[in-house]
Image (cartoon, rainbow, N blue to C red):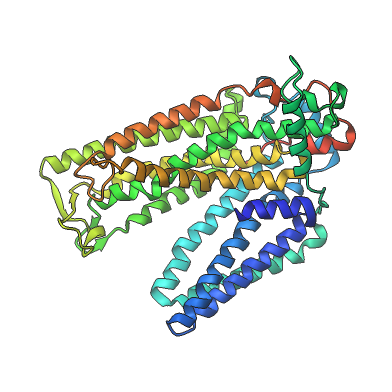
Amino acid sequence: MTPLLGGYIADSYLGRWKAILLFFSIYLVGMTFVAFAAFMPSGPEASMIFFPAAYVVAAGMGGLKPLASTFGADQLDDDEGDEGDEEATGDAGEEGEGEGESEGGLKDSYFSLLYWFQNLGAFAAFTVLVYLCQNVSFQVGFTVAAIGLSLSLLVLVMGSRHYTIKPPEGSPFGVVISVIGQAIVKRVPGQGMLAGARTSFGGRHSDDDVDMVAQLGRLLPVFVILIIYWGINGQMSTTFFNQGCQMNLKVGNDFTVPVAALSLFDTAIIILLVPVFDSWVYPTMRKMGIPTSTLHKMMYGMGIEVAVMAGAAWLESERRAVVDAGHLAGQSVCFEGDGEAEPIIAADMTIFWQVPLFLGMGISEILTSIPAMDFFYSEAPGPMKSVCSALELLTVSLGQWLMAGLIPLVNSGEDKWIPSDLNQVRVVVQRRKQPKYCVLNLTVSRTPLHPALTPPTHRPGRATSRAFSSSSRRSSA
């Protein structure tokens, strides 16, 4: 929830720049105490410093993340660009043209580049820092991380005189609640769900206030769809790992592949292909007449997710067939010495069969996560851009919680769908259902928004046009 807190503080009180400095400092303080705790002798004293510091790190990073992405996009905003966007967009909402249909542009490249660097950082963390922690010492690994954060903050501050810094516009939440309340009490037939709140229909709010709430309503369907998307995407670190643990992890006689290491294929394909999509794939699609709005991109990404989950179901069927045929690789190394009553046996089928699944998920993320960041920035009302970017991040967490609750639910009966030993039951059934969830998600994503949630035919005044302009598009998470 800290991204929402960071977004609210930035939009309502401090502005994005001051809020970035605040949460970056919290992040750095937490990381410094984590490194300090690593130098202490193991014991209660070290734990009393380490665990609170880890929570401080999470709070600082969570509050910082939506602010950094929106602050970067602010640097590409100017009056001329906003006017151009407003003219190009016209009356958003008609046939989906308002959902960020701009053909390329600086914001396209910005969000793609942002997502590329985020994954490059993750790749470095899971390779360099993990190596330092495991093969040198945790003291060295955590200290390097703290020094890296310090240098990042220093570089950020050094460039401050060149930034476009927008002041906070005050909390809009009271206005949002009031508009919704008046619209519920006073319905105006044939004029849309929110018309009763407009002064022209006897309400107390200006057209600009009502348009802001309508703009938020346009984000709601995408918000729900992304929760399902990220829930399915989260299978990479749950059921994919379960499946991989019961495959052959050996390479040669001596090396055992860590199951979690396959996640690097997801990160690597993103690092490799983000520039390719930005510079070649999308321009080629446009030349061929293939739609490339943010919503179209998300639809393509969800379609690939359907294919990945169908591939996972097929792979599990094949793995079970190998087990049933008696081709076994012995006890799974993931469960050695864990006290299971019976040994859990792995199939003699290399874990590298899972590589295409992780590569496919990476491509799906390029097509879905980057445009989702773009959409939640471009379609957000001006006073709520940080909060709306935080909402996009919230879909990731809610998706993970959704699936975290689903697995215990399907295991609650006598017949467990996903037990510790996949050779016993029905992971194939679960995997076959998940592509159906993806298809449902894909279908909903193509459903037109309710007309009441699209802006009215009148154009907002110049004083607030910046708040509702639909900039070139977006890209990252």
Q: What residue is rendered at 84% in x and 26% in y?
A: 459
- Residue 40 place in picture, x, y as percent: 48, 84
**Outermost residue to the front:** 185
- Check the image and report above or below for 240 versus 214: below
- Check the image and report above or below for 451 versus 340: above
- Residue 332 place in picture, x, y as percent: 21, 56
Q: What residue is rendered at 63% in x and 72% in y?
A: 29
Q: What residue is rendered at 63% in x and 24% in y?
A: 449
- Residue 67 place in picture, x, y as percent: 69, 53
Please indicate whether residue 30 sits to the left or right of residue 355 in the image.
right
Label total for image: 0
Q: What residue is rendered at 48% in x and 37% in y?
A: 228
Please indicate whether residue 446 sits to the left or right of residue 474 in the image.
left
From the viewer's side, name the closer residue of 423 and 138. Answer: 423
Quadrant of the rendered structure where residue 178 is?
top right
- Residue 113 place in picture, x, y as percent: 62, 48
Quadrant of the rendered structure where residue 424 is?
top left
Residue 469 shows in this picture: no
**Outermost residue to the left:** 326
- Check the image and report above or below for 99 versus 56: above
From the viewer's side, name the closer residue of 15 and 475. Answer: 15
- Check the image and report above or below for 96 versus 114: above
From the viewer's side, name the closer residue of 220 and 428. Answer: 220
Residue 419 shows in this picture: yes
**Outermost residue to the bottom:** 41
